[in-house]
Every structure is written in structure tokens, then in C-alpha cells.
Image: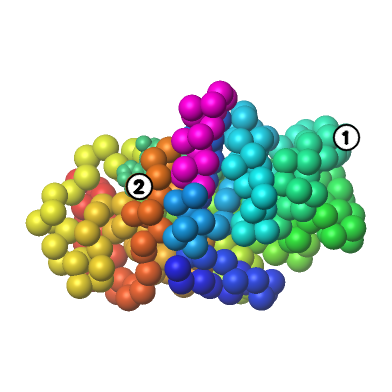
Amino acid sequence: MEHRTFGKTRLQVPVVGMGTWQTFDVRGYGPEANARAVVDAALEAGANFFDSSPMYGQAERVLGKTLEGRRDQAFIATKVWASTAAEGQRQIQKALGFFGGKVDLYQIHNLLAWRDQLVTLEKLVGENKIGIIGATHYSASAFDELARVMKTGRIQAIQIPYNPLEREVEKIILPLAAELNLGVVVMRPFGEGGLMRNPPSESDLAPLKPFGVTTWAQALLKWILSDPRCHVAIPATSKPARMTENASVSAPWFGETERALVTRLAER
Ligand SMILES: NC(=O)c1ccc[n+]([C@@H]2O[C@H](COP(=O)([O-])OP(=O)(O)OC[C@H]3O[C@@H](n4cnc5c(N)ncnc54)[C@H](OP(=O)(O)O)[C@@H]3O)[C@@H](O)[C@H]2O)c1
């Protein structure tokens, strides 16, 4: 697995990690064993960056459980999603319980009550319970506010949507992240699965073969990661074999010609 330096933090993160929205919001022996198998595949491939949130139902609990006895092998990026400081503090204490008392990247989900949450998170960084702080938003309508938070100098990372059909971040957010040297986590690499519904044929993908790409999922991840301002993409999957497939993406990265081809295939 290839790694990138996560902005100014000097941390090394794998280029492919994993999201847990929907896929890890499960209960019971069978579904939780399946989640464990997905995490096994991720760790086996070195894709050990795991994103979660209290917004994702059972996901934090299930992810924490799959990492019992091997928490030190994982980089945990979860979120606080609360409209008050008190509620945020309760969420964070609960999550710290799931993740062995330490969260590597704590993100403010959808910028909710970000001023209050920043104060709490900064205190916990001082207590060494949190590594670094980030902020996330899924909607372009919130990018002006996200830029404001980035410019405070109080966060070290952002999480944003980026794929061939969602390119709004190219205007302000990615240039600003590069200027400020922030870590960039890419959510929704497959457009919440929408981009996977009508995958291109093998012959459509043939020009990408010299780049080690044989599947549409790999083409999309490579399209994202060919932008050096992006450090880690976090596709979600409920299938261990797909985790392995997603994690196989590495250099050589695409040039403009290959990126344009993938964009055309996505827009069909
Ligand atoms: N901060 C925010 O506002 C926010 C918002 C959205 C998402 N996120 C984070 O970003 C993560 C990723 O985004 P997402 O979950 O919305 O969507 P996504 O990763 O773009 O797409 C996930 C879908 O792709 C399918 N998939 C995964 N690998 C595949 C492969 N190799 N071949 C074919 N299909 C494949 C999965 O189905 P199977 O399970 O059947 O494989 C799933 O339905 C989330 O899980 C979450 O952690 C954050």
C-alpha cells in the first residue's frame, strides 16, 4: 500500500482507507462477523485508515469491536456530530470507549456547532486522547463555511466529496487545502454507489490497463488519487473481496488523458 504525508501533520496515511456509513451500521453475530472480515481484508492490504461517525448508527461500535486486540494497527478517523458542546462531549466519551481511549483524527461532522466542538477537541488533543482535528462537509453549499474553518488554522485535515461527477472542491477547497498544507480525506469516491450502477465494459477500460487498472472501482479511485492534493480515499464496502480490490490501487497515477477518459465514462 502506498502512503502519503497527511498535510503538515507528517503522519503517513495509506492512499486507500475505508468508510463505514451504512455498511457497518449492523447488529448481530452474522453481520458483525462480516464487518470483521471486511476489516481483516483492509488490514491485510494495509488500508488501515477507518472513517466513522455517530451519525452512522452502530458503525462506531461495530468498527471498534472488529479492532479489539489490534487497535494499534488502525488509524481511526471518527466525527463529532452534535449541536451543543455537552452533547458533543458525551459522543466523544462514548467513541473513546469504542476505540481504546484514543482517536487519531477527530472531525467535526457537517461543521455542526464547529466553534463549540473545536474547543472540546483542542482540550482533548492536549490530553493526548485525540491526535489531530478535522472538519467535513458533503455539500458544496457549505464550502464557504468550510473554507472559513480551514482558515482558522485550528484544523489539520478536511474530508470532502470528490469524484468525476462531483468536482466542486476543485474551485476553492482543494487549492486552499494545498496552500494551507492540510490533510485531505475523500468521501463518496463512488458517489454513494451511484457510479457503480452502470460500470463501463472491459474494452472501455482497456486503455487504463497499463496503469494496473482492471475494474471500474480501481479507475475511479485512481482518478481521485491522481490529484496529489488528495491523500486518502475512503470507499465503503460490505464485501471483503471488494475491500481487497479497492486497496490494490497504487502508482503509476493517471495523467490528464486518462483522467479525461474516466470522466467521459462516468458521464455516459
Ligand atoms: N462526512 C460526510 O458528510 C460523509 C458523507 C458521506 C460519506 N462519508 C464517508 O465516506 C465514506 C464513503 O462514502 P459512501 O459510503 O457514501 O459511498 P462510496 O464509498 O462512494 O460508495 C459505497 C458503495 O459502493 C459499493 N462498492 C464499494 N466498493 C466497490 C467495488 N469494488 N465494486 C463495486 N461496488 C463497490 C458499495 O457496495 P457494497 O457494500 O455492495 O460493496 C457501496 O454501496 C462513507 O462510508 C463515510 O465513511 C462522509
Examine the structure image and report whether residue 224 is included in the region drawn in magenta. no
**Residue 103's spot in the image, x, y percent?**
73, 52
**Residue 194's spot in the image, x, y percent?**
34, 38
Residue at (86, 48) in percent of width and height: 120
Please identify the residue farthest to the front as the structure is shown: 69
Q: Which residue is mark 2?
A: 241
Where is 168 relative to 24, above or below?
below
The N terminus sits in image quarter = bottom left
**Residue 168's spot in the image, x, y percent?**
46, 53
Binning the other alpha carbons within 10 Å of mark 1 as few (below 14), some (14 to 19) or many (20 upward) gives few
Element on which disc 2 rests = helix
Nearer the observer, 198 or 56: 56
**Residue 91's spot in the image, x, y percent?**
78, 36
Using the numbered discs, state the Cα–Cα distance from disc 2 to disc 1 in whole angstroms: 41 Å
Residue type, numbered disc 1 = Ala
Residue type, numbered disc 2 = Ala
Nearer the observer, 43 or 23: 43
Dot placed on the residue nearer the N-terminal end, 2 or 1: 1
Element on which disc 1 rests = helix
2 and 1 marks in contact (CB < 8 Å): no
Magenta span = 26-39
Examine the structure image and report whether residue 30 is included in the region drawn in magenta. yes
Q: Quadrant of residue 257?
A: bottom left
**Image check: 221 left or right of 152?**
left
Tag nearer the camera, 2 or 1: 2
Instruction: Classify mark 2 as within 8 Å of ligand 1 or not, answering yes or no.
Output: no
Ligand 1 is found in the corner quadrant, namely top left
Binning the other alpha carbons within 10 Å of mark 2 as few (below 14), some (14 to 19) or many (20 upward) gives some
Q: In the rendering, which numbered label is found on residue 86? A: 1
Residue at (89, 61) in percent of width and height: 126
